[in-house]
Amino acid sequence: MSRELFENALREVRRFYEASQELSGFKAFPGDDGLRWQELEPHYINPATLFSEDQSIQSGQFSDALDALLAVKDVALWRETYKDTNIGDDFLNRFGCYELFGWEGHFHCQETRGFIVYSAGELYYPWHHHPAEEMYFILAGEAEFATEGNSPKMLKPGDTVFHAENQPHNMQTREKGVLAWVQWRGDMSVAPVLTDHLNGEL
Ligand SMILES: [Fe+2]
């Protein structure tokens, strides 16, 4: 049963993905032969509840995708990338991410990795970096995105931002939460790490 929910989520993701020149130009959506369903043990975390109850991301132009992504929240393998860091409990309790397709995704894909990222409102995601090149595509809500040396920019549904290899970036939500699709390419073997020299005391 959960497979059907994920198949539906994948279909909905494909719709906005292929309609976006930025996403499709960054990395073509994987062909059917490049995606293989893999049964993963679900892992639930508190932010998944906030995600489902967050009124600030409940509607808008990508509401079909949002509904399909919400429908898998109980069976998704939510990641805890920053669990053993000094990022703090508030972040761990209000930020969540799962991989829909990719190396450890619900659909295995070798050539690229695609994630859903949720942040509640009034939350700061500190400076971090990773060797993979990355594109964020905003699905609902809004957030300010900054890269090292550049002032933050508020992004809304349909907007994208590109992060180069190992380029430090951060994200700050204000009154609204944010839901984003995140795509990786390049060296995808290293998980994000906090950029200590930019973060000061966390
Ligand atoms: Fe990133």
Image (cartoon, rainbow, N blue to C red):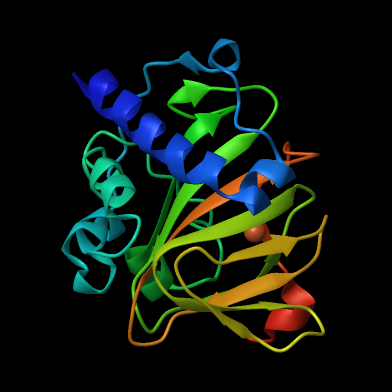
Query: In this rendering, does residue 11 appear at all?
Result: yes
Q: Quadrant of residue 106?
A: top left
Q: Depth check: 56 or 126 in front?
A: 56
Query: Does residue 1 lie above or below 148 as drawn?
Result: above
Query: In this rendering, does residue 202 appear at all?
Result: no
Going 75% across and 81% down the picture, which residue do you hit?
A: 198
Query: Ligand 1, what quadrant?
Result: bottom right
Going 20% across and 57% down the picture, which residue do you hit?
A: 52
Going 68% across and 81% down the picture, which residue do you hit?
A: 199
Q: Quadrant of the N terminus?
A: top left
Q: Depth check: 178 or 61 in front?
A: 61
- Tell me where residue 188 appears, x and y as whole percent: 72, 38
- Tell me where residue 141 appears, x and y as whole percent: 37, 72
Query: Does residue 77 lie above or below 81 as drawn?
Result: above
- Tell me where residue 147 appears, x and y as whole percent: 73, 76
Answer left or right for 64 relative to 191.
left
Q: Quadrant of the C terminus?
A: bottom right
Answer left or right for 139 relative to 25.
left
Answer left or right for 23 relative to 158.
right
- Tell me where residue 148 appears, x and y as whole percent: 79, 79
Q: Depth check: 194 or 165 in front?
A: 165
Q: Quadrant of residue 38?
A: top left
Query: Does residue 112 lie above or below 52 as drawn?
Result: above
Answer left or right for 1 relative to 142.
left
Query: Does residue 88 lie above or below 53 as drawn?
Result: below
